[in-house]
Structures are given as structure tokens and as C-alpha cells.
Image (spheres, helix red, strand yellow):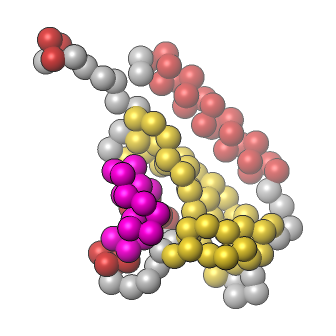
Amino acid sequence: MSLPDLSRFAVLLVSASVLTAAAQSDEPVRVSGYFCGAKYEQVAFLQRQAAGDSEEIAANNVNKVVGKQTCAFFLPAHAIPVGDEAVMSDGLVYKVQSFIFLPEKVERWTGTYFGSMQSKRTFSEL
């Protein structure tokens, strides 16, 4: 990605975050899927997925490293969206979202990853 493309992508991410934050309320929504107990655990889960692991294997890998069951699949449940962030790590962009699950009032994280922000170089450029 060239520098102008990178700037445009960054503006789009910020715009999406602002619009999402404006649309959030204290109203519960129904969510399901893989969630982790902390933001850094969710990023680790997404890094494993980006490396080619399935959701189940990625969750098991994170759980083994952390030493507890932190990442797991959640059946549809009611949760209040708290916020979302864009995180860059090792050239990938991750969008992580925080939810407070009801009635337990426990925060869990979910997310997705986007393509690489690193430019591709040919062998002749090295």
C-alpha cells in the first residue's frame, strides 16, 4: 500500500469508529461468536486466525498461552456494546469491539482483522 492509500485507509478507519461510537447506546443487542476476556487476548486470537488457524484452534492456542479458558464461542446472548478500537500489530489492522454481557455484567472482546499495511517489495528491490 502506498502512503496516500495508507492515509485514506486510516481516515476510513477513524470515520468508521466515530460513526460506530455515535450509533452505540445502552440498549442491549444480541451477539454470538468467539469472544475473549481481554483486548490483548482478542488481538492474539485474531493474529492466530490471520496466520491461518481456524477459530477453534486459535482460541485453544490463546487459552493454552494464557493458562485459562479466556477465548470461547458464545451462543446468542444479550450484551451492551461499549466501544471499538483499531489496533495495528505486525503490519495487520485489527478492529476489536468490547461488549458487556448481561446479566453477568462481564466485559468480553470480539473483532476482525484487515489486510496487511506493509507494502510488498519485489526481489529486485531488496
- The residue under the point 80% across, 56% down is 24
- Residue 9 coordinates in the image, percent (x, y): 55, 28
Of 124 and 15, which appears nearest the observer? Answer: 124
From this viewpoint, which residue is outermost toward the right?
27
Tell me: residue 44, above or below residue 118: below
Of 32 and 78, which appears nearest the observer? Answer: 32
- The residue under the point 40% across, 32% down is 117
Q: Which stretch is magenta? A: 45-62
Q: What main secondary structure does the magenta stretch of the protein show?
A: helix
Which quadrant is the C terminus positioned in?
Answer: top left
Examine the rendering and report whether any part of residue 91 can be seen.
Answer: yes
Examine the rendering and report whether any part of residue 37 can be seen.
Answer: no
Q: Indicate left or right for 17 with 10 as reference.
A: right
Q: Quadrant of residue 124?
A: top left
- Residue 82 coordinates in the image, percent (x, y): 70, 64
Of 23 and 115, which appears nearest the observer? Answer: 115
